[in-house]
Image (tube, rainbow, N blue to C red):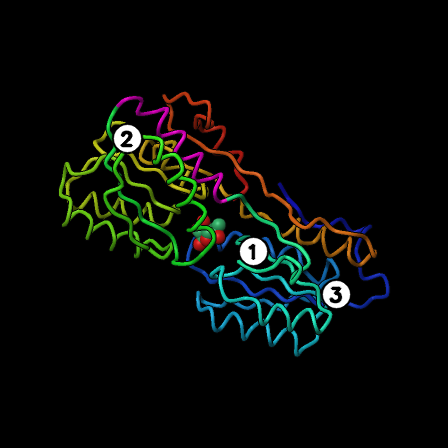
Amino acid sequence: EDETSSQDTAPAADGELIKVGFAQVGHESDWRAANTKNYQDTFSAENGYELSFVDCDNDHAVQIETVRGFIEQELDYICIAPIQSAGWDTVLQEAQDAGIPVLIVDRAVDADPSLYTTALGCDMVAEGEAAGNWLAEYLGDKEANILVIEGSVGASATLGRTEGFDNILAQHDNWTKLDSQSGDFTQAGGQEVMESFIKTYGNGGFNVVVCQNDNEAYGAMDAMDAAGITYGVDGDVQIISFDATHDGLQYTLDGKITCNVECNPLQAGFAEEVVKKLEAGEAVDAWTLVKDEAFVAPGIESQYAITMSQEVLDGRAY
Ligand code: GYE
């Protein structure tokens, strides 16, 4: 879905570009790259915007200073994709005192909602629950010995996916979460964590690996390949992943990632919608949910997920 603005509703009627700051998380994943491109395409000069884009490289302190810089530059709107959910009260108050609307995008903050204008993104807890519900349906009465490669520490995407999956885990006496470690949402991180898990639990010691994004799953697959561990629908280990990016879904179509829970990175259109409403003096919703789906490998039927096919993959925008 292309969420860019249409020309006839371009907001800069008086020829002035609307100044938007975007304090982006970093460049850790394919999801992030798609999300960045979507913001740059949407908040373009052509569409009436001057976008100040800053890649905060997964550094919370840098992100706070970036937002302070946007306030000093008196930008019209500030979008923040929060690296971590804690530690936002002070700078959000500063933006509010300066009268600059703040949009919390993609990930959530752990702060009083009166401190920002609106929030938008996927429901990370629901994503974790979708993964758990699918696994329960897939395994039936079978035991699960589960390893979890978490995302970045303190990120709402990590906290939510963990909470959601754990909600379902708690309903199953024969599921054991053996271990969980952060792989920082990167391929290298996923590989490193998986290598250490393999050392500790050995080939045969686990049958489910939950990777909290696709890039971590690629690293985990490399580590299992090197150790001679088979994975996928025909293997010993079932991989669950999140994001459902194009490459991630290719692996799902190939039966290597058994279940892939989507988080749609094309979110800038929702942010632009909010900006347009505020420009028009209209009220905005406190929260906008970006919807997502789950996908499973061919041959699996699930009430929680779409069975992958070439057609489904070809229909992907990211
Ligand atoms: O899952 C991961 C990215 O916040 C939903 O961040 C996002 C997550 C996404 O690095 O790939």
Q: Which residues are magenta?
A: 124-141
- Asked which secondary structure carries label 3, the reply is strand
Q: Which residue is mark 3?
A: 18
Label 2 – label 3 distance at C-alpha: 55 Å
Image quarter in which the N terminus is found:
top right
> At 23% from the left edge and 43% from the top edge, which residue is drawn?
178
- Asked which secondary structure carries label 2, the reply is loop
> At 33% from the left edge and 53% from the top edge, which residue is drawn?
187
- Specify few, some or many for label 1: CA neighbours under 10 Å numbering under 14, 14-19, or 20 or more: some
The answer to whether 27 appears left or right of 143 in the picture is right
Tag nearer the camera, 2 or 3: 2
Residue 173 is marked as 2
Residue 136: x and y in percent read: 35, 27
Dot 2 and dot 3 residues touching (CB under 8 Å): no
Dot 1 and dot 2 residues touching (CB under 8 Å): no
Residue kind at label 3, given as amino acid type = Ile
